[in-house]
Amino acid sequence: MKKQLLSLLLAGVCAVSCNNAKTENPLLAEWNTPYGIPPFEQIKPEHYMPAFLEAMAQEKAEIDAIVNNPEPPTFENTIVAYDNAGELLNRISAVFSSDNGVNSNDQLRAIAKELSPLTSAHSSEISLNDGLFQRVKAVYEKRDSLNLRADQMRLLTEMYKGFERNGANLSAEKKEELKSVNAELAALQLAFGQNLLQETAAFKLVIDKEEDLAGLTANQIAEAASRAEKAGMAGKWVFGLDNPSVMPFLANADNRELRKQILEAYLNRGNNGNAQDNNEVIRKLVELRLKKAQIMGCENYAQFALGNRMAKSEEAVYNLLDQIWEPALKVAKQEAEQMQQYMKREGLNEELKAWDWRYYAQKVKAELYNLDEAAMAPYFQLENVFQGIFHVANKLYGYSFNKLENVPLPSSEAVAYEVLNRDGGKQGVVFFDMFARPGAKRGGAWCSTFKGQTYEDGKRVGPIVTIVGNFTRPVGDEPALLSIDEVETMFHEFGHGIDNLSKDVKYNGLRGYPRDFVELHSQLNEHWAFEPEVLKVYAKHYKTGEVIPSELVEKMDKSGKYGQGFATTEYLAASYLDMDFHVLKSIPENLNISEFETRTLSERGLIRQIPSRYKSQYFNHTFGGGYTAGYYSYIWAEVLDADAFEAFKNTGDIFNQEVAAKYLNELLKRAGEDDAMTLYVNFRGQEPGIEPLLKNRGLK
């Protein structure tokens, strides 16, 4: 039925005058803009559905042309042709995904819901197209006689494997079953994310007594007052569940009862028994993912998901997590005892609770290292942090950044930069959209592209990259002053940006990495954020221009590993939870999500004061898709990034040009041209060990 619906819709689009549609719809017209940037200001919600339908019709025609080509299958007429198919759909999808992520509203969410079954069916029609697969298979079977370059062989091999993983070898009956499952999964993942967005935006902690603001900084109070005014509650203070609001409140607010209220609201998102409750969504997702895995001949979904990743097996993932869990939990218990003792010294003879952790961690850290993190913020003005990330990229890779004016922007708060390489050539364009907009912008931080790096007429064409955050915004006359975590996040996401900007591959299908390799570049870039040599460049007081004092840098360095017991344990808890859901070989009847979570984490000894970084009902990484049976990827990649930074440190120069050039040429530029571990060994000369990670986190 879905197949018939899609065919009718596509046929209907083709019956309309395409010339008129392209003239009137900016998504379908040529983008005569600087650098080929999407004409964001011209795009309206009503443009999306017609554009998607036209783009799907065009890709269908491109696939039909490959399948019906009377010439025998060749690398060019089949593999390259398929690699280039769907360009229009890709660019429209990128614009819509961004718009719905940073400017979301009811209209865009409704479009996303309507699109989900159509795009899922369209994708399945292509991946399960037997005529297309047979042509790819014909080329693959004679690959050894084609005299292909290494990158061409890699493209062919990965394309063939991709068809197999998408069910190309299934029976006709199983293919139809898989299509149905894929469509349901897409709809449920979308629903999960939309529920979370609305749940996060719905809660407001309203404070009307000034004494309840004790402990908060002037900037945090001013931001809360600004939120209240926007909500029609002038004279009060409003705090929300987005990280720039809730996390500083938990770390600084003296009012223990209010800390409890906001943390419980944060932890119960998607678990309130209302229209946005995610429990049934999760149950269905877990069941359908297992069903998909079984259709594909696997015992569980993790086995299926790990098939094309570095880890390869669930045993390898658990082995890594287990190696880190015990030392992390040991340190976390030590931290808890330190905080419990501090509470007693302060006259509070009560048990440390989850809503106390961030608050007393700040107190203990200040006592141990005489460091007040709030005193650091004046040195981390957003504009200065930009200069820091640009400085590191310039010193390592020779990139320079020029701010662009009068170009289309994906949101009213975005800024754009042209990126030039060492020779002055155009490397690409990057947008930054860094401030939280609860209800309109999804939570977290991410990097994506409006257009990936390509080759046209034998020449490299740079990508158009976007980096999005949910940071503390300016208040009144004060600039945006970032927390230490926000600075680290800025370097992290810009590491993804450097990755996208640096790629230099000939084929679209070679731009990606395995999921558990993709965080290497972002996490490696974090290492430079607080190096004293780098801090001296960008960490300047926003009022005086004074460079951050060396004694403050020394305190920050000494205190840097404090709190890693908590940070590592809460992360690992979420990683275990993600895996435990997806190694199930059968789903218990009436699976209770919260009980499953409590059981799986308590059995490993997680202390009650540390909730999982993501409780199931708002664990968007896994249940919204993207990191399903893959949240472990951050720590897997950290083994790599810790080892990679050692390569720089061991030379005595964190900007060693020989090491940087090797990293650029062997890893960043080549992207998916070879097996991920092979690329890493080409750079490092050996496979990484776990010791640098444990050392960096202070767990050994």
Image (cartoon, rainbow, N blue to C red):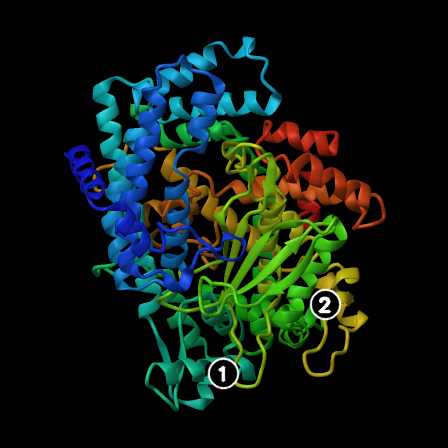
Residue at figure coordinates x 29%, y 41% from the top left:
119
The amino acid type, in three-letter code, at marker 2 is Tyr
Q: Is residue 290 visible?
A: no
Disc number lying in front (2 or 1): 2
The amino acid type, in three-letter code, at marker 1 is Ile
Q: Which mark is residue 221?
A: 1
Chain-order first, disc 2 or disc 1: 1
Q: Residues within 10 Å of mark 2 (few under 14, many from 20)?
A: many
Q: How many numbered dots are placed on residues in this image?
A: 2
Q: Secondary structure at mark 1?
A: helix
Residue at figure coordinates x 58%, y 51% from the top left:
497
Residue 398 in the image: state x and y as whole percent.
Answer: 74, 51
Residue 71 in the image: state x and y as whole percent.
Answer: 39, 14
Would you say 604 lies left or right of 330 here? Answer: left
In the rendered image, the vertical position of residue 571 relative to residue 563, given as above or below: above
Residue at figure coordinates x 36%, y 39% from the top left:
581
Q: Secondary structure at mark 2?
A: helix
Disc 2: which residue: 538
